[in-house]
Structures are given as C-alpha cells and as structure tokens.
Image: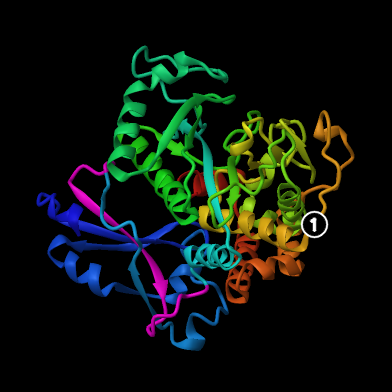
Amino acid sequence: MDWLKEHPEVRTIRVAAADLNGVARGKRIPARFASKVFTEGTRFPFSVMNLDIWGEDIEDSPLVFETGDCDGLLMPTERGFMPMPWLSSPTALLPIWMFHMDGRPYAGDPRQALARVVDRYKAAGLSAVVATELEFFLIDDSGKTLRVPPSPRSGKRRTGGETLSLRALDTFDAFFTALYDACEEMDIPADTAISEAGPGQFEINLMHQADPLKAADDTWLFKMLVKGLARSHGFAASFMAKPYDIWAGNGMHTHFSVLDAEGKNIFNDGGSKGSDALRHAVGGCMAALPGSTLIFAPHENSYDRLVPNAHAPTGIGWAYENRTAALRIPASGPAARRIEHRVAGGDVNPYLMIAAILGAALIGIEDKIDPGDPIVGNAYAQGLAQLPATWNMAINNFAEDPLIRRIFDTELVENFLMTKRQEIHYMAELSDQEQTELYLDTV
C-alpha cells in the first residue's frame, strides 16, 4: 500500500492476473476500496484463468457448468501497487494470483505453476537466476497492410530491417525514452535496447534476477507496458511470433544459471566448457523440447516463426556460442556461466515459459541426462531431431510427454490442452488477416 499512499491523485486501480495465454484478466476498482482489495483480495471464477484466446469459456471444461463456475480467491503478489504509465489518468495496477478459498494455491494459475517449480529448486538446495530478452515490432495497423510507423521526425517509413541501427532507435527516441522512464516507475529492470532485423523490430533485455517469479513478473508487465505505451504514441507494438511473412519473427530468449545453497553457480567448473551440471541441465531441456514446444510456441502463428534459416531454431541441439542452436552456451566468464534457451517466441506466457525451462533443467540435473556432443556450425544443416513443425503436433506431444507432467500439475496440463484444442478448432475458420488482427494486440 505504500506506493498508493504516496500517490493520492490515483482514483482507480486495476487488479490483474495472467491467464494460461498470458492475457491480463482483471477488474477496475475505485481507489477508495484499494485497502480492502489489498488485504482481502478479490474473486474471479476459476474458469477465468482458462479462457481461450478470444476470452471465451472452454467448452466442456469442468471449471464451468460442472462445478457451478465457482470462484477462486485472488490475492496480491509480492509486487504490490504500481503505476500504469500508458494510461492518460493516474491509475494503479495490483498484480494478483489465484488460490482456493481455503488458501491452497490454485494449480491452474500459471504463476502458481512457476512457484511450484521454484519450490522444487528450494527443496533441492538450489535457486535459479533468470533473464529474458524480448523482441517486438512497432507497427502501423491503421490500414489493411501492416507497415512500420512513419518516423515522428521525418514522416518517412523504413522499408527494411536495420540490425543494430542507431538511426532506427533514434527514429522512435520519444517512445523509448518514455518506455525506460515507465520501466523505472514500475521497477522493471530494462537494460539494452537494439534495432533488430525486421522493419520496426526492436529487442530489449531485462536484467538477470535471482528470483524467477520476479523475472516472469517483469516480463509479463513489460509486454503489457510496451503494448499500452505504443498505443498512446499512435501506433501498435506486437510480440506476435510472426507479423510479417518475409521477415524474421519475434523471439523471447531466456538466460539462466543455477546457484547452490552458498550462492555459487553450479554451471561453473572454472573452465570454458562448464560443469557436468550444466550439461545435465542442457540434457533435460533437450529431452523436454518435443513436449514443451507448445509452451514456447502456443499459437497457430507461432509455427510460421519456427522454420529453417529464419533466425529461430528448428532442431533439437546445443552448442557453444552458436545462435543457430536451440540451446546456446554464451561466451562468458566462468562465474557467469549460463544457458540460453532460444526456442520461445514473443507470444508466450512468461510464467509457463520459465517454468518449462527451469523444470526441464532440474529434471536433467536430477536424472543426470547426457545431452550428447555439442554441434558445430549451422544447426539447420546438421540432420538433428526436429521440434514439432505444426501446432497440432505440438499439442499431441504436450499431451503425451511424461516429462511435462513432472513439471506441471495435471490440472494445468489438462486445462491448457482443452484451451489449445478449442483454439485450433475455431482458428481454422479465420482468414490469415483475421488471425493477424487477433494475435497482433492480444499476445
């Protein structure tokens, strides 16, 4: 409540939780009721955490009519109140997550799923350090064709990508200045920004966090902030996996390391290759990739990104300092030895993504899974086992892979499967343009 007390100008608050697709679901509440919400929480039906991408109930879900569409209790996360700088009037956001009425965590809540994985690390005397890299496009979607917004300075539009171009960054300097200011207000540790390979495409890295829940919160809130702030500047921002057919898509790469009870990086053996624990974590991530691809590529459009020679991995392999591999060990000092997981698109739910990565890595460490030899050279030309190439394949693999049920509670697995099966059924009725319009702002 401290932040809210310091900002008496705030007249309304929003309470919001991430559903299985990472979409913010919540309420608008007058600020005079904020203290009650903060101490007592609020209520949503459990089914709200399990809506499809259109925001519709899942047909035949036991969370709806079978149980009377009963409520869960949503309580504030550790984050507390924060500003919503993209809105015109002073407004506070209170992130929340779901519990049963008796105080038990609700297993179908994606943030609770990540907390469950974090607890498994704690039980093993370990903790994870996590950072995410988020790619997004700035887009003029006012016409039938998506285009890069005109430069606020010259009125001209870029026609191609400008990798690491300062000119591209400077073109939207007012937006990025406002974005960094907003990140400071919201305690989101935004670091380096670069111009990427697509027209109007950028990447911003978030700093490493010793708390995976904080890292996931930061990522979820950052996506919300970027999309909202872009609209206030007169254009759209999208984390959609593949807005343009001819340009590279949006990825969300995740870097992580694992610390022991003394705070020492268990991936560090003092050398350049890393420890057996690093190899085993890689092995776990590789073993889980066929089943967990649905987490990393959750939408129909996601699979347009996962194609050969498009700066997104398609094969299941690992390598040192090689960006064509699904799992990359970046060059670093020994103490910073880490794994970069490169499969996820920008359209993911960050809580499920980080839970899937850390959960698979812990299985690899526990089971001492050997990843085999690292690849050298172009991963697309290695003849590697492949990630699921279609949404339907990924859904089936997610349903059948026993490693998934070691990472996620059965209820969340079944809810996610029902969601994706409903979406794939109804998505077939939409044109490509209708799908783009749906995904552009939603994910």
Q: Is residue 357 magenta?
A: no
x and y percentages locating residue 54 in the rendered image: 49, 59
| Corner quadrant of residue 155 | top left
Quadrant the N terminus occupies: bottom left
Q: Residues within 10 Å of mark 1 (few under 14, many from 20)?
A: many
Where is mark 1, residue-wise?
Answer: 369
Of 114 and 437, the residue lying toward us: 114
| Residue 152 placement, left or right of 239 | left
Q: Residue at x 73, y 49 (%)?
A: 282
Part of the protein shown in magenta: 85-107
Q: Nearer the viewer, residue 181 or 364?
A: 364
Question: Residue at 78% of width from left, 56% of height from top?
Answer: 287
Q: Quadrant of residue 95?
A: bottom left
Predominant SS along the magenta part: loop
Would you say 279 lies left or right of 135 here?
right
**x 82%, y 34%: residue:** 380
| Circle 1: residue type | Ile
Please, which colouring scheme is shown? rainbow
Residue 260 placed where, x, y %?
58, 55
Q: Nearer the viewer, residue 337 or 156?
A: 337
Where disc 1 sits, the SS reads loop
Looking at this view, name the residue that lies furthest to the left.
8
Q: Is residue 389 left or right of residue 336?
A: right
Does the magenta segment cover residue 102? yes
Tell me: residue 109, above or below residue 213. Answer: below
Q: Quadrant of residue 14?
A: bottom left
Residue sitting farthest toward the right: 383
Relative vertical location of residue 164 with respect to residue 250 in this rendering, above or below: above
